Amino acid sequence: MPSTAQHLVIMGVAGSGKTTIANLLSKRLGWIAAEADEFHPAVNIAKMSAGVPLDDDDRWPWLFAIRDWMGAQAKNGRCTIVTCSALKRTYRNVLAQAPGEVAFVHLDGSGELLAQRMKTRTGHFMPPSLLPSQLNTLEPLSPEEAGLRIEISNSPEEIVDAILQHLGWAVA
């Protein structure tokens, strides 16, 4: 297990399973978790609910708020898990500024699987009509970024096991 503040950003487009995986990781690791959607101002949620994609001007304050939350948790000696689409490298660069070590876990899958998941979920403001916009915006992790890509077709438990094994933190 890590000896300094660690942050896992569970990233990917809508429907990739970020919340499910973050919650399972939080239980397994005992780390505090946050949903990036909680950091959106009401205007962003209204925009997305209406089927309008966010632009960079909408995203910067949101990303800074997530980064600052991660930093506050690190200051209090807590490791974190946060869900965040983190679609562009420039967005991930903001999150990577949090004190401690930040690693990205890109949950990735086919457009068909993602669309099917979005159509069957309930209680979320993001309509399936925005999936193509997210897929077009997505910049996969580069080799220079700390992180890994995980295929989402496996079970949530298998995905979590693979993440922990990759990070060298396999726990019961």
Image (tube, rainbow, N blue to C red):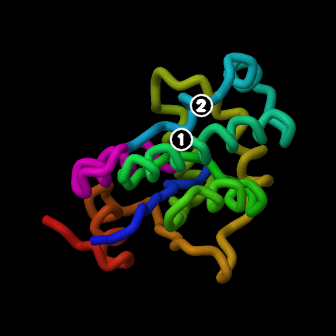
- Label 2 secondary element: helix
Q: Mark 1 points at which residue?
A: 69
Residue neighbourhood size for the residue with mark 2, other residues' Cα within 10 Å, grouped as few (<14), some (14–19), many (≥20): some
Instruction: Name the foreground residue: 133 vs 116.
Output: 133
Q: Do the residues labelled 2 and 1 touch (CB within 8 Å)?
A: yes
Residue 19, by quadrant, is top left
Q: For mark 1, does the 10 Å Cα neighbourhood hold few (<14), some (14 to 19), or many (20 or more) residues?
A: some
Quarter of the image that includes the C terminus: bottom left
**Residue 49 rendering spot, x and y as whole percentages:** 68, 20
- Image: 123 above or below 8: above
Foreground residue among 59 and 14:
59
Lateral position of residue 136 relative to residue 41, left or right: right
Q: What amino acid is labelled 1 in the image?
A: Trp
Give the residue drawn at x 31%, y 50%.
31
Could you tell me which secondary element the residue under label 1 belongs to? helix
Residue at image coords 69%, 43%: 64
Res 55 label: none
Q: Which residue lies furthest to the left in this view?
A: 172
Q: Does 91 sit left or right of 145 as displayed?
A: right
Of badges 2 and 1, nearer the viewer stands 1
Image side of residue 60 versus residue 77, left or right = right
The majority secondary structure of the magenta stretch comes to: helix
Check disc 2 and report the residue beneath it. Answer: 39
